[in-house]
Amino acid sequence: MSFSVILLSRAKHELLDAWEWYEDKQPGLGDRFIEETYKTIQHIQKHPEHYQQRKRLYREALTDIFPYLIIYRVLKKEETIVVSSIYHTSRNPRKKYK
């Protein structure tokens, strides 16, 4: 069973900012970042409880290659994954869940 995915506005904004940053560094790198991020999201869709539960029912999945965490919640009854943040691992960890 595959869950549907909702990206909250914060996650969308972080995804776009990261894409722009990587594209400025090297053309095509932003697209590679997007591909890797969505590959991780697809894995979450298929196996939503694979990643360990962290703070307040949130789970964190680390992307391959790029230093980003996908922070999400699983809504079982609705069969939905809610991505609240796409978080660079070098940022202050206290701001992950705000």
Image (cartoon, rainbow, N blue to C red):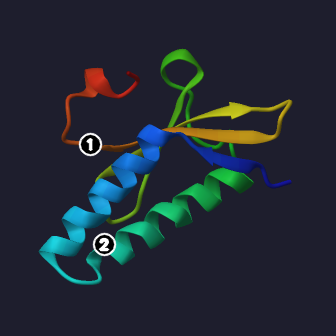
Q: Position of residue 4 (x, y in %)?
A: 75, 50
Q: Where is residue 14 in the image (x, y as percent from the top left)?
A: 35, 48
Q: Position of residue 20 (x, y in %)?
A: 25, 65
Residue position for label 2: 30
In the image, is residue 85 above or below residue 25? above
Q: For residue 18, what is the image quadrant?
A: bottom left
Residue position for label 1: 89
Q: Which residue is drawn at 19% across and 41% down?
A: 90
**Gap in angstroms between the C-alphas marked 1 and 2:** 17 Å
Q: For residue 43, what is the image quadrant?
A: bottom right
User: Mark 1 or mark 2, which has the lower sequence index?
Assistant: 2
Q: Which residue lies furthest to the top in this view?
A: 56
Q: Work out whether residue 70 or residue 27 is closer to the camera in this orientation and state it.
A: 27
Amino acid bearing label 1: Thr
Q: Position of residue 48 (x, y in %)?
A: 68, 44
Residue 3 left/right relative to 77:
left
